Amino acid sequence: MRIDVTLNPAEIRLLPELDLSQTVCVVFDVLRATSTMTTALEHGVRAIYPAVSIEEALELREKHPGALLGGERRGEKIDGFDVGNSPLEHLQLAGKEIITTTTNGTVALRACTGAREVLAAALLNIDAVAAYLTRIHPERVRIVCAGTGLHFALEDAIGGGALIARLPQVKKLADAGQLLLQAWRTAEHDPAAAIAASRNGKRLQEIGRTEEVAWCGQVGVSEAVGRLDGDKLAHAEPRQVL
């Protein structure tokens, strides 16, 4: 297994130009989009439709009139939408479908649509994602760090490194992969504290979202692996949601 890495939003814009047909892309937006999606699927949400813009989200709502509208801009719920981008808002939505648009996470997911598979990963489901990759054993995996705004995000690097550390079958790891692995090795003694100390973690705490940051810092507590299937993210494998 070879690991490639996309480190930031500038590199994400180049993904549609790459041949990803034999690559499984694993997207990390730890604070908070992929953590929220993982939480939603773990707690019974049927499917999530990632949209790159508010306008596209509203168009998708016309195709899926029963779906909730979710997402954020500048970290806050979009006016007129049903839910924001907080994982805690997605604990009681079992049976629902959600159309969501976020500043970085949904853009990163959609940039990977030419890939063999696209997975949504977070610290929450890191063990489940690693186990899934071990089962399907792709020749190439690309870790995509969604970032924050226009910038690299440390928490995504920590998540990506945690995944690499759980894939002993990795045979080739370039410098960017080594960077992610080192980020995880530095943080693994207390991942929640490392996430909270990141730039984005501090910003979210400043606007009153400390509980959400702590939630996203949990490691391996979810078995849900979201996989993009056409325009929707759903469970990668059939499972019974209790």
Image: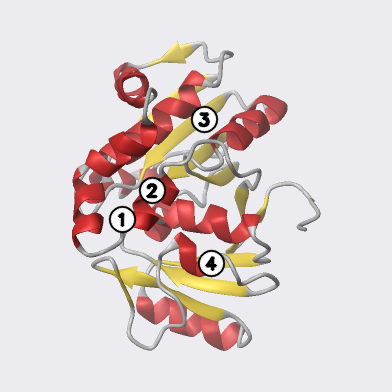
- Characterize the local packing of mark 3: few (<14), some (14-19) or many (20 or more) Cα atoms within 10 angstroms: many
Nearer the N terminus, badge 1 or badge 4?
4
The secondary element bearing badge 4 is classed as helix
- Characterize the local packing of mark 2: few (<14), some (14-19) or many (20 or more) Cα atoms within 10 angstroms: some
Q: Are marks 3 and 1 in contact (CB under 8 Å)?
A: no
Of badges 3 and 1, nearer the viewer stands 1
Viewer can see residue 29: no
Residue sitting at 59 percent across and 23 percent down? Answer: 139
Amino acid identity at mark 1: Thr
Of badges 2 and 3, nearer the viewer stands 2
The CA distance from mark 2 to mark 3 is 28 Å
- Characterize the local packing of mark 4: few (<14), some (14-19) or many (20 or more) Cα atoms within 10 angstroms: many
The CA distance from mark 2 to mark 4 is 15 Å
Give the image quarter of residue 4: top left
Q: Identify the residue under disc 4.
A: 90
Check the image and report above or below for 82 versus 148: below
Q: Identify the residue under disc 3.
A: 141
- x and y, in percent, of residue 204 in the image: 25, 57
The secondary element bearing badge 3 is classed as strand
Q: Identify the residue under disc 1.
A: 210
